[in-house]
């Protein structure tokens, strides 16, 4: 196993070792003095809303499932076929 095999990648299922909360790694930030943090999005909903994402230090996380989650089909963003009005004359 190499060092890269143990690194958390976006889309992996992870667990916070301290709180036990689980979710999908949706963000990875690198800070100026070497701190690396993971943003975790728990699955499920409460009162019709998704649970809030939270951020923890990378060493505080452990990988539950190393297979990244399937990428969802984009539902927004730039359009390839954006219509353009004709120029006024």
Image (spheres, rainbow, N blue to C red):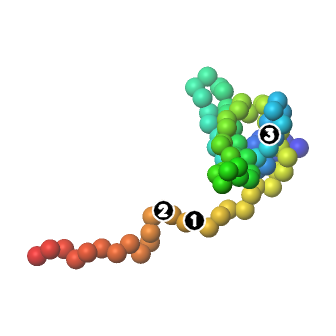
Q: Which mark is residue 62?
A: none
Report which quarter residue 34 is drawn in: top right
Residue at horizontal 64 percent and vertical 51 percent from the top: 49
CB atoms at circles 1 and 2 under 8 Å apart? yes
Which residue is rendered at x = 67% and y = 38% of the image? 54
- Check the image and report above or below for 55 versus 83: above
Mark 1 and mark 3 lie on one chain; the one further toward the N terminus is: 3
How many residues crowd mark 3 within 10 Å: few (<14), some (14–19), many (20+)?
Answer: some
> To which residue does mark 2 refer?
77
Residue 29 visible in rendering = yes
Q: Residue at x 68, y 46 (%)?
A: 51
Locate residue 18, reporting x and y percent. Answer: 82, 30
Q: Which residue is mark 1?
A: 74
Q: Position of residue 37 (x, y in %)?
A: 67, 33
Q: How far from the left and from the top, in percent, is residue 43?
A: 74, 51
Instruction: For marks 1 and 3, give the one nearer the viewer.
Output: 3
Dot 1 lies on which element?
loop
Quarter of the image that includes the C terminus: bottom left
The residue nearer to you, when weighing 76 against 28, is 76
Nearest to N terminus: mark 2 or mark 3: 3
Disc 2 + disc 3, Cβ < 8 Å = no
Q: Secondary structure at mark 3?
A: loop
Between the C-alphas of marks 1 and 2, the distance is 7 Å
Q: Are marks 1 and 3 in contact (CB under 8 Å)?
A: no
Mark 2 falls on what kind of element? loop
Residue hosting label 3: 21
Count neighbours of disc 2 (C-alpha within 10 A) and say few if under 14, some if 14 to 19, many if 20 or more.
few
Distance of label 2 from label 3 (alpha carbons): 31 Å
Q: CA distance from mark 1 to mark 3?
A: 27 Å
């Amino acid at each position: 196993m190499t060092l890269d095999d143990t690194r958390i990648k976006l889309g992996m299922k992870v667990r916070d070792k301290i709180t036990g909360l689980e979710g999908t790694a949706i963000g990875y930030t690198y800070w100026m003095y070497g701190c690396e943090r993971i943003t975790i999005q728990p699955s499920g909903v409460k009162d019709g809303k998704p649970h809030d994402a939270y951020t923890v230090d990378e060493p505080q996380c452990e990988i539950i499932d190393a297979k990244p989650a399937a990428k969802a089909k984009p539902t927004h963003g730039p359009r390839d076929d954006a219509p353009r009005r004709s120029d006024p004359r």
